[in-house]
Amino acid sequence: MSSSSSSLISKTAFLKYDQCPKAFFFYKKHPYLRDPVSKEKQFTFNRGHAVGKLAQQLFPGGIDVSATAKSSRSAFELTQQLLNENANTIYEATFIFNDVLVMVDILHYDGENWMAYEVKSSLKVSDAYIKDACLQYYVLKNSLGKFSDLFLVTLNANYVLDKEINLKQLFKKRSIKLNAEENFEFFGITVSKMNLVLERNMIPDIPIGKQCFSPYSCDFLGTCWKNTEDPKSVFRIGKSDREQLFNLYFSGAETVDKMDMNTDLKPHIKIQAQSILSGQPYFEKKEIKNFLKKINSNYCFMDMEIWSPAIPKYDGTGPFEQIPFLFSICYLNNGGPDFINYLKPIDSDSRFDFLTALLEATKNFESVIIFDKNLEQQVLAKLENMFPEKKSEIEILRGKLVDLSEPIQNFNFFHPKFNGNFSLKAVSEIFGEESDYSGLEITNGIIAMHKYQELQESENIINSEQIKQQLIAYCNIDTLTCMKFLEYLKENTKD
Ligand code: SF4
């Protein structure tokens, strides 16, 4: 092994090449072009790290190379040293072969053979995971005598917590030996191609395309997608097949003003294109009025936040189970908005208290308006299952639900400020220059979920209190936005 650390090809670099050689080239030669890591991505990394740490306990007593090694090279050297010293379990064991560097989460010697384990904080094994594990297998097979197999370790969807975590049941493993052996040649060939890209030292001429989002959202969208920032870009059209948008884009219709509206376009694409072009919102007044008739005069707005921890925390729950932890009820009181909230303590399950508080808060309203009913319906169905004694009250609440996203989903309403996004946050853009969400610490449900999780680790009362206030503020903005949107629809569909 003679290459310097910077010339080595990591697993990340390999996956980038596999997705798009241009992404690989940027990653190796122009890493400063990478988009900033979003909070959501950072939370996902943190979650993966926590699950990986827990999985190490499947093989306790190992030595963690990453705890002391300061660089890839020193991690490699330390791994070699541990192997020479006959260590039998190594965490983050680091190997280099053919300029490819991999770190395996767990390497274990069972007395006869070495087995490697790659941990994923996921319930499913994706094609991308298999590819990444096959690369590790390729390096290990070429580096380690008596190497037998590499397993992908994922969370078991059927696991249910019963008092204490049972690691052997929480995780399940899948051998990738067959896949890896079948594709063994592929890795050697691909590494040669990757080295050629680097030697050529020219940005590969690859246009934007579906690969930018598959299997992962690329880290260089900010660089390659700069030309699509025009407010009239066809990529501002939402709820459409990406392939169709790329076809439009590459046929010369980069912006909606260049689209031929006489061609066979789907109605919802035409509605959006015309609205973006004119800068005016679209209202199908008759349909919206029919929708508004579903809302009784005595109504409130409701929003829920859910937490789905990878590692189950409460008895009877499994990995990634959706646990409702916060609701906001917003209603008109003396001409202004008023709120009722319930924030479940993280230390106790308390879903019964959550449900009781929700039923109490909504019982006097005839219509309960939500935005995108899917989540609420799922949560209520689960609560009904858990607490059959509340079934009739839950059914009454279900009967009151009105989904305010319906006019948007059915394209009876569209606003050019949606920007290809149909979330409540996009709706809030209608109401002025400054979105109600700007300035908030929490700006979407994923961040809310991870912030709630932070309460679990927080030992600082002031910090915990701040997080609770941030969570409630975010949830209240969701219901307040619904209130504004309803008023807006009423106002704009008046005769
Ligand atoms: S944004 Fe798309 S084209 Fe650009 S590097 Fe990434 S995947 Fe390749």
Image (cartoon, rainbow, N blue to C red):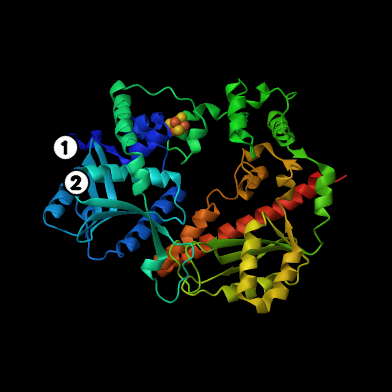
Residue lying at 38% horizontally and 36% vertically, measured from the top left: 16
- The location of residue 32, given as percent across then percent down, is 35, 34
- The location of residue 44, given as percent across then percent down, is 43, 52
Q: Residue 376's quadrant in the figure?
A: bottom right
Instruction: Give whichever of 307, 143 is nearer the camera.
Output: 143
Residue lying at 62% horizontally and 36% vertically, measured from the top left: 241
Residue 168: in sight, yes or no? yes
Residue lying at 40% horizontally and 35% vertically, measured from the top left: 18
Q: Is residue 93 found left or right of 422 in the rendered image?
A: left
- The location of residue 402, given as percent across then percent down, is 74, 58
Callouts 1 and 2 close, C-beta under 8 Å: yes
Q: Looking at the figure, which quarter contains the C terminus? A: top right
Instruction: Give whichever of 417, 94 is nearer the camera.
Output: 94
Specify few, some or many for label 1: CA neighbours under 10 Å numbering under 14, 14-19, or 20 or more: few
Q: Name the disc covering residue 397, or none.
A: none
Instruction: Give whichever of 279, 466 is nearer the camera.
Output: 279
Seen from this angle, which residue lies furthest right? 495
Q: Name the disc covering residue 1, or none.
A: 1
Q: Looking at the figure, which quarter contains the N terminus? A: top left
Q: Is residue 246 above or below residue 453?
A: above
Q: Residue 15's quadrant in the figure?
A: top left
